Image (spheres, rainbow, N blue to C red):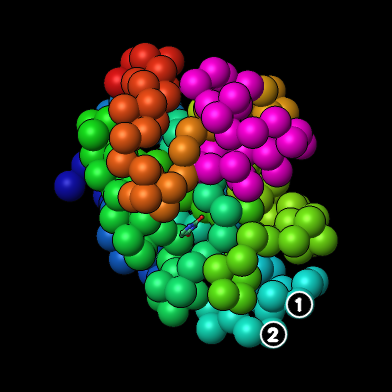
Amino acid sequence: MDRELSDIIKTLKSVIEVEKGFGITEFLMPEKPNPAKKGSGPSGASNLESLEMDVLSCKKCQLHKRRNNAVFGVGNPRARLMFVGEGPGYEEDMQGLPFVGRAGKLLTKMIEAMGLERKDVYIANVVKCRPPDNRNPLPAEMIACEGYLAGQIDTIKPEVICTLGKIASQALLKTEVPIGRLRGEFHAYRGIKLMPTYHPAYLLRNPGDKRLAWNDLKKIMALLGL
Ligand code: URA
Protein backbone atom coordinates (compact mmCIF):
# COMPACT_ATOMS: atom_id res chain seq x y z
CA MET A 1 0.00 0.00 0.00
CA ASP A 2 1.11 3.51 -0.75
CA ARG A 3 3.07 4.96 2.24
CA GLU A 4 0.96 8.17 2.39
CA LEU A 5 -2.30 6.21 2.40
CA SER A 6 -1.17 3.95 5.23
CA ASP A 7 -0.19 7.07 7.29
CA ILE A 8 -3.69 8.51 6.72
CA ILE A 9 -5.29 5.23 7.84
CA LYS A 10 -3.11 5.17 11.00
CA THR A 11 -4.07 8.77 11.85
CA LEU A 12 -7.77 8.01 11.28
CA LYS A 13 -7.52 4.94 13.54
CA SER A 14 -6.01 7.00 16.36
CA VAL A 15 -8.70 9.73 15.94
CA ILE A 16 -11.40 7.03 16.19
CA GLU A 17 -9.76 5.63 19.36
CA VAL A 18 -9.82 9.12 20.96
CA GLU A 19 -13.48 9.63 19.95
CA LYS A 20 -14.40 6.25 21.43
CA GLY A 21 -12.83 7.46 24.68
CA PHE A 22 -15.40 10.30 24.70
CA GLY A 23 -18.19 7.87 24.01
CA ILE A 24 -18.52 8.88 20.34
CA THR A 25 -19.26 5.69 18.43
CA GLU A 26 -20.63 6.91 15.13
CA PHE A 27 -19.75 9.47 12.51
CA LEU A 28 -21.99 12.51 12.51
CA MET A 29 -23.63 13.01 9.11
CA PRO A 30 -24.52 16.54 8.01
CA GLU A 31 -28.20 17.31 8.52
CA LYS A 32 -30.51 17.87 5.56
CA PRO A 33 -31.28 21.58 5.15
CA ASN A 34 -34.46 22.46 7.04
CA PRO A 35 -36.10 25.88 6.65
CA ALA A 36 -37.01 25.85 10.34
CA LYS A 37 -33.38 25.52 11.46
CA LYS A 38 -30.53 28.00 11.35
CA GLY A 39 -27.39 27.22 9.33
CA SER A 40 -24.25 25.64 10.67
CA GLY A 41 -22.43 26.83 13.75
CA PRO A 42 -22.16 25.77 17.36
CA SER A 43 -25.41 24.24 18.57
CA GLY A 44 -25.38 25.69 22.07
CA ALA A 45 -26.69 22.31 23.20
CA SER A 46 -24.08 22.02 25.95
CA ASN A 47 -24.97 25.51 27.23
CA LEU A 48 -28.60 24.43 27.43
CA GLU A 49 -27.61 21.24 29.23
CA SER A 50 -25.79 23.16 31.94
CA LEU A 51 -28.73 25.61 32.29
CA GLU A 52 -31.03 22.62 32.61
CA MET A 53 -28.92 21.16 35.42
CA ASP A 54 -29.27 24.49 37.26
CA VAL A 55 -33.05 24.51 36.76
CA LEU A 56 -33.47 20.92 37.95
CA SER A 57 -31.84 21.77 41.28
CA CYS A 58 -33.22 25.33 41.57
CA LYS A 59 -34.62 26.49 44.91
CA LYS A 60 -34.76 30.21 44.16
CA CYS A 61 -38.48 30.51 44.89
CA GLN A 62 -41.19 28.67 46.80
CA LEU A 63 -42.45 26.80 43.72
CA HIS A 64 -39.68 24.21 44.06
CA LYS A 65 -41.27 22.85 47.26
CA ARG A 66 -44.31 21.32 45.57
CA ARG A 67 -42.92 20.37 42.18
CA ASN A 68 -42.73 16.79 40.97
CA ASN A 69 -40.48 17.87 38.11
CA ALA A 70 -39.02 21.16 37.01
CA VAL A 71 -39.90 21.74 33.34
CA PHE A 72 -36.91 23.18 31.52
CA GLY A 73 -37.95 23.24 27.86
CA VAL A 74 -37.63 21.07 24.76
CA GLY A 75 -36.87 21.33 21.10
CA ASN A 76 -34.25 22.27 18.62
CA PRO A 77 -31.33 24.19 20.16
CA ARG A 78 -30.94 25.94 16.77
CA ALA A 79 -34.63 26.72 16.28
CA ARG A 80 -35.54 29.84 14.35
CA LEU A 81 -38.84 29.96 16.21
CA MET A 82 -39.34 29.68 19.95
CA PHE A 83 -42.67 29.45 21.80
CA VAL A 84 -42.87 30.73 25.36
CA GLY A 85 -45.77 29.82 27.64
CA GLU A 86 -46.60 30.74 31.19
CA GLY A 87 -45.63 27.76 33.34
CA PRO A 88 -46.14 24.02 33.74
CA GLY A 89 -49.59 22.62 34.50
CA TYR A 90 -50.45 19.25 36.07
CA GLU A 91 -49.37 17.06 33.13
CA GLU A 92 -46.20 19.06 32.52
CA ASP A 93 -45.23 18.81 36.21
CA MET A 94 -45.80 15.04 36.11
CA GLN A 95 -43.81 14.49 32.90
CA GLY A 96 -41.17 17.22 33.19
CA LEU A 97 -42.01 18.41 29.68
CA PRO A 98 -43.70 21.61 28.47
CA PHE A 99 -47.10 21.68 26.75
CA VAL A 100 -47.99 17.99 26.95
CA GLY A 101 -51.54 18.38 28.32
CA ARG A 102 -54.70 19.47 26.48
CA ALA A 103 -53.36 22.94 25.69
CA GLY A 104 -50.13 21.31 24.55
CA LYS A 105 -52.01 19.14 22.07
CA LEU A 106 -53.53 22.26 20.56
CA LEU A 107 -50.09 23.94 20.46
CA THR A 108 -48.80 20.89 18.55
CA LYS A 109 -51.64 21.32 16.02
CA MET A 110 -50.79 25.03 15.68
CA ILE A 111 -47.12 24.17 15.01
CA GLU A 112 -48.13 21.52 12.46
CA ALA A 113 -50.50 23.95 10.76
CA MET A 114 -47.42 26.13 10.20
CA GLY A 115 -45.82 23.22 8.32
CA LEU A 116 -43.44 22.45 11.18
CA GLU A 117 -43.01 19.75 13.80
CA ARG A 118 -42.42 20.17 17.52
CA LYS A 119 -38.82 19.07 17.05
CA ASP A 120 -38.19 22.01 14.68
CA VAL A 121 -39.05 24.68 17.25
CA TYR A 122 -38.12 25.28 20.87
CA ILE A 123 -40.77 25.36 23.60
CA ALA A 124 -40.23 26.85 27.05
CA ASN A 125 -42.09 28.65 29.83
CA VAL A 126 -41.62 31.79 31.90
CA VAL A 127 -41.56 29.77 35.14
CA LYS A 128 -40.13 26.29 35.25
CA CYS A 129 -42.11 24.90 38.20
CA ARG A 130 -45.88 24.46 38.46
CA PRO A 131 -47.74 27.14 40.40
CA PRO A 132 -50.19 25.41 42.81
CA ASP A 133 -53.77 24.94 41.60
CA ASN A 134 -52.79 26.41 38.23
CA ARG A 135 -52.74 29.95 39.60
CA ASN A 136 -50.81 32.62 37.70
CA PRO A 137 -47.13 32.80 38.64
CA LEU A 138 -46.42 35.62 41.12
CA PRO A 139 -44.15 38.51 40.09
CA ALA A 140 -41.46 37.34 42.56
CA GLU A 141 -41.55 33.83 41.05
CA MET A 142 -41.20 35.19 37.51
CA ILE A 143 -38.29 37.39 38.57
CA ALA A 144 -36.55 34.46 40.29
CA CYS A 145 -36.89 32.39 37.09
CA GLU A 146 -36.10 35.22 34.62
CA GLY A 147 -32.42 34.34 34.15
CA TYR A 148 -33.20 30.80 32.98
CA LEU A 149 -35.47 31.87 30.13
CA ALA A 150 -33.08 34.71 29.20
CA GLY A 151 -30.26 32.12 29.10
CA GLN A 152 -32.31 29.83 26.85
CA ILE A 153 -33.13 32.69 24.49
CA ASP A 154 -29.52 33.96 24.43
CA THR A 155 -28.27 30.46 23.61
CA ILE A 156 -30.86 29.55 20.98
CA LYS A 157 -30.98 33.04 19.45
CA PRO A 158 -34.30 32.42 17.66
CA GLU A 159 -35.33 34.79 14.89
CA VAL A 160 -38.85 34.95 16.29
CA ILE A 161 -40.33 34.39 19.75
CA CYS A 162 -44.04 33.65 19.93
CA THR A 163 -45.37 34.33 23.42
CA LEU A 164 -48.49 32.39 24.33
CA GLY A 165 -51.01 34.36 26.34
CA LYS A 166 -51.09 37.37 28.59
CA ILE A 167 -48.63 36.24 31.27
CA ALA A 168 -45.73 35.36 28.95
CA SER A 169 -46.34 38.32 26.63
CA GLN A 170 -46.52 40.87 29.44
CA ALA A 171 -43.54 39.34 31.28
CA LEU A 172 -41.21 39.45 28.29
CA LEU A 173 -42.35 42.84 27.05
CA LYS A 174 -42.45 44.29 30.59
CA THR A 175 -45.86 45.82 30.00
CA GLU A 176 -49.39 45.62 31.36
CA VAL A 177 -51.06 46.19 28.00
CA PRO A 178 -53.77 43.50 27.55
CA ILE A 179 -53.04 40.54 25.27
CA GLY A 180 -55.90 41.54 22.96
CA ARG A 181 -53.99 44.72 22.13
CA LEU A 182 -50.48 43.21 22.12
CA ARG A 183 -51.23 40.34 19.74
CA GLY A 184 -51.10 40.60 15.97
CA GLU A 185 -48.03 42.84 15.76
CA PHE A 186 -44.32 42.15 16.10
CA HIS A 187 -42.67 43.69 19.16
CA ALA A 188 -38.98 43.66 20.10
CA TYR A 189 -37.44 41.59 22.89
CA ARG A 190 -33.73 42.35 23.19
CA GLY A 191 -33.44 42.78 19.44
CA ILE A 192 -35.52 39.66 18.62
CA LYS A 193 -38.92 39.90 16.93
CA LEU A 194 -41.65 38.83 19.33
CA MET A 195 -45.22 38.00 18.32
CA PRO A 196 -47.72 37.70 21.17
CA THR A 197 -50.71 35.47 20.50
CA TYR A 198 -53.47 33.82 22.49
CA HIS A 199 -52.61 30.95 24.83
CA PRO A 200 -53.84 27.56 23.53
CA ALA A 201 -55.72 27.01 26.83
CA TYR A 202 -57.62 30.25 26.15
CA LEU A 203 -58.29 29.09 22.57
CA LEU A 204 -59.78 25.84 23.90
CA ARG A 205 -62.27 27.94 25.87
CA ASN A 206 -62.76 30.53 23.11
CA PRO A 207 -62.49 28.66 19.80
CA GLY A 208 -63.89 31.68 17.97
CA ASP A 209 -60.54 33.42 18.51
CA LYS A 210 -58.55 30.64 16.79
CA ARG A 211 -58.88 32.63 13.57
CA LEU A 212 -57.07 35.59 15.15
CA ALA A 213 -54.31 33.33 16.50
CA TRP A 214 -53.93 31.78 13.04
CA ASN A 215 -53.48 35.28 11.57
CA ASP A 216 -50.65 35.85 14.09
CA LEU A 217 -48.99 32.56 13.14
CA LYS A 218 -49.28 33.42 9.43
CA LYS A 219 -47.33 36.64 10.09
CA ILE A 220 -44.58 34.57 11.70
CA MET A 221 -44.60 32.16 8.74
CA ALA A 222 -44.28 35.06 6.30
CA LEU A 223 -41.36 36.50 8.26
CA LEU A 224 -39.54 33.15 8.38
CA GLY A 225 -40.38 32.33 4.74
CA LEU A 226 -42.22 29.14 5.72
N1 URA B 1 -49.49 26.06 29.81
C1 URA B 1 -48.30 26.71 29.76
O1 URA B 1 -48.26 27.93 29.78
N2 URA B 1 -47.20 25.99 29.70
C2 URA B 1 -47.18 24.66 29.66
O2 URA B 1 -46.10 24.07 29.58
C3 URA B 1 -48.43 24.01 29.70
C4 URA B 1 -49.57 24.72 29.78
Q: Quadrant of residue 70?
A: bottom right
The residue drawn where x is 29% and y is 55% is: 105
Amino acid type, callout 1: Gln
Would you say 165 lies left or right of 32 here? right
The residue drawn where x is 37% and y is 33% is: 209
Q: Nearer the viewer, residue 218 or 49?
A: 218
Q: Which residues are magenta?
A: 162-187
The verdict on residue 101 being magenta is: no
Dot 1: few (<14), some (14–19), or many (≥20) neighbours within 10 Å? few
Would you say 47 lies left or right of 160 here? right
Callout 1 touching callout 2 (CB < 8 Å): yes
The residue drawn where x is 43% and y is 47% is: 202
Q: Is mark 1 within 8 Å of ligand 1?
A: no
Q: Position of residue 56 (x, y in %)?
A: 62, 74
Q: Is mark 2 within 8 Å of ligand 1?
A: no
Dot 2: few (<14), some (14–19), or many (≥20) neighbours within 10 Å? few
Q: Position of residue 218 (x, y in %)?
A: 34, 21
**18 lies above or below 74:** below
* Residue indicated by mark 2: 65
The residue drawn where x is 49% and y is 68% is: 89
